[in-house]
């Protein structure tokens, strides 16, 4: 082995590049090949429509109400359910934090996440249907006719609560348990009541975590797919954006249009997440997430 | 802690909310199970009689044996390959500081943050052009996209816990990279590897979108077959669809229970420390 090569190897090692570093390469190549490349490919493909100039796909999307309405329809489902789930999660997480035996509760709540949206959709079809247990109970209480909760907006909404609330709750719980209880005790000792402690101590400390929770929950709700088809009305009120992207690709075989819709989907997500994280920096008041900084 | 009346009302309201949610969740699961064993069920709380005929029907009609074999093959391959790629990569990420490490980290975070249907459509397009989609390998590759980074991000803190002097000692005694991994690191990392791979297993059984976009008729996993069964409801009796749903639930929940012996439920949600 020549002296020049040896010194090159030594120089590389000083930069942290040696045989161990090479172990990261298969992982990097894999993600580049199956995540980054397809994404860029889709982006380029979206500017090569089947007919028309480069922007034809995007123009078509924004001129056809049947297509652009899907953004509005999806937001109409995703925004309320995300807010509901996160707003409900905070008080529950704050209460569960004080529990000694959280394990049983968190285990039950992780079940719908694990089962996935398809299973939740089938379960709700049986449970919420006109002859299901929920309507049976409502009739027993005194309702004159069954409530329609499947194959419409409410079915999708409820499926997103069943699988989304446990997600936001467990995420919030992990942030809440990261807050040093001594901070709240100090507040209590100085005479702050529960509401004040929440508003002036817990909420500011929780804000960064809540912004991330909101962003992740929104992105999940925005890409609702199987339950919008199975439990909703995929031809009308729950014709969400992922349905039209899927139909463009696998029913009309118009891959450029499907890619354009997928890119727009990603675009909306990026805009909302950027807004949320931007708001976080406005609210965030210093490094205190563990209270030990 | 003894609070004022308003605080106690507030606490009661929170528990009532949790209770209401859990009752509805259990009733949802329960109604699927009861329906799958019921004969006829119209305007009563419970079916007129109980039977297991829907399970035999579902077993034949939905070709459940084939689907279960495909599911096991896909999940097994995904678990194995994501472990083989992910664990060494996590080791490198934990032990070395190299230029561009931040960018590599971001590269591994992205597939976990972007929802599957968004990247799944362009990915499926590429896999179809490579003639991989529709085959079992297409399904496996698609499922590896989120699981490889997932294993890496879970394993990094486990590697960091190991004292680097252990590895240095092994090197001094002449162990190469292969022996170092097989004889030192893997035994020390077993709890982490077990946790990561069990989570990958549970997630892959339930991964609908990526499998749905890339599976052909002979490469469907259980969850995709369940989707098609529900989608074509009306063709077959609802009870046999629910019987299939129960088979799916049991498969998923058994592995969830095993996984929960090694990880806490919150870990299933917080994929990575931000």
Image (tube, coloured by chain):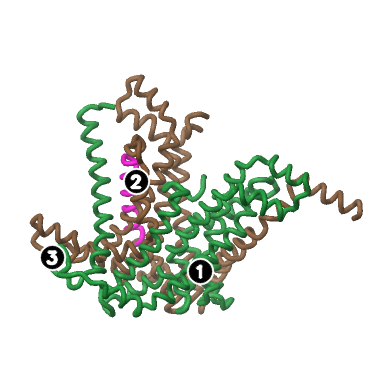
Chain colours: A brown, B green
At which x and y percent is residue A184? 38, 27
Same subunit, labels 3 and 2: the answer reads: no
* Secondary structure at numbered mark 1: helix
| Along the viewing direction, whichever of A42 and B224 lies nearer the viewer | B224
State which quadrant residue B26 falls in.
bottom left
Q: Mark 3 lies on which chain?
A: B
At which x and y percent is residue A173? 39, 42
Same subunit, labels 1 and 3: the answer reads: yes
Residue at the image position 29 percent from the left and 69 percent from the top: B242
Query: Does the segment drawn in magenta span residue A191?
Result: no
Residue B245 seen by the camera: yes
**Label at residue A104:** 2
At which x and y percent is residue A3? 91, 51
Residue assigned mark 1: B74
**Label at residue B186:** none
| Along the viewing direction, whichever of A105 and A183 lies nearer the viewer | A105
The number of numbered badges drawn on the structure is 3
């Amino acid at each position: 082995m020549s002296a020049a090569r040896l010194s090159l190897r030594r120089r590389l090692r000083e930069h942290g590049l040696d045989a161990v570093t090479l172990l990261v390469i298969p992982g990097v190549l894999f993600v580049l090949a199956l995540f980054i490349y397809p994404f860029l490919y889709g982006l380029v493909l979206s500017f090569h429509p089947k007919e028309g100039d480069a922007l034809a796909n995007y123009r078509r999307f924004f001129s056809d109400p049947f297509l652009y309405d899907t953004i509005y329809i999806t937001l109409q489902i995703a925004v309320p359910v995300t807010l509901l789930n996160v707003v409900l999660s905070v008080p529950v997480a704050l209460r569960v934090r004080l529990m000694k035996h959280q394990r049983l509760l968190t285990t039950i709540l992780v079940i719908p996440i694990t089962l996935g949206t398809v299973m939740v959709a089938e379960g709700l079809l049986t449970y919420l249907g006109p002859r299901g247990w929920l309507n049976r109970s409502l009739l027993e209480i005194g309702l004159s006719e069954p409530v329609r909760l499947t194959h419409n907006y409410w079915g999708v909404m409820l499926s997103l609560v069943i699988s989304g609330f446990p997600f936001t709750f467990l995420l919030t719980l992990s942030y809440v348990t990261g807050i040093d209880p001594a901070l709240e005790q100090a507040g209590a000792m100085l005479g702050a009541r529960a509401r004040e402690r929440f508003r002036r101590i817990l909420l500011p400390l929780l804000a960064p975590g809540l912004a991330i929770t909101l962003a992740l929950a929104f992105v999940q709700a925005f890409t609702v797919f199987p339950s919008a088809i199975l439990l909703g009305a995929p031809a009308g009120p729950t014709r969400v954006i992922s349905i039209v992207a899927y139909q463009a690709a696998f029913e009309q075989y118009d891959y450029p249009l499907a890619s354009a819709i997928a890119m727009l989907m990603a675009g909306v997500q990026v805009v909302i997440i950027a807004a949320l994280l931007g708001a976080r920096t406005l609210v965030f008041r210093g490094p205190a997430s563990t209270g030990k900084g | 802690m003894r609070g004022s009346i308003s605080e106690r009302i507030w606490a009661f309201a929170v528990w009532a909310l949790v209770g209401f949610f859990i009752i509805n969740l259990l009733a949802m699961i329960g109604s699927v199970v009861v329906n799958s064993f019921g004969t006829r069920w119209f305007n009563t709380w419970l079916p007129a009689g109980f039977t297991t005929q829907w399970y035999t029907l579902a077993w034949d009609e939905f070709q459940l044996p084939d689907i279960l074999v495909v599911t096991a093959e896909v999940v097994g391959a995904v678990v194995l390959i994501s472990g083989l790629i992910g664990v060494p990569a996590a080791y490198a990420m934990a032990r070395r500081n190299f230029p561009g490490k931040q960018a590599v980290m971001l590269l591994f975070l992205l597939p976990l943050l972007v929802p599957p249907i968004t990247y799944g459509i362009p990915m499926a397009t590429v896999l179809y052009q490579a003639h991989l989609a529709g085959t079992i390998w297409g399904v496996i590759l698609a499922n590896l996209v989120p699981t490889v980074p997932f294993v890496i991000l879970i394993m990094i803190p486990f590697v960091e816990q190991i004292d680097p002097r252990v590895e240095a000692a092994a090197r001094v005694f002449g162990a190469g990279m292969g022996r170092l991994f097989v004889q030192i690191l893997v035994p020390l990392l077993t709890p982490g590897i077990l946790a990561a791979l069990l989570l990958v297993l549970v997630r892959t059984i339930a991964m609908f979108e990526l499998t749905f976009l890339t599976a052909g008729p002979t490469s469907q996993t259980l969850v995709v077959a369940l989707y098609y069964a529900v989608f074509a409801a009306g063709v077959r009796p609802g009870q046999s669809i629910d019987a299939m749903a129960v088979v799916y639930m049991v498969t998923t929940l058994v592995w969830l229970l095993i996984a929960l012996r090694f990880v806490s439920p919150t870990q299933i949600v917080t994929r990575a420390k931000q």
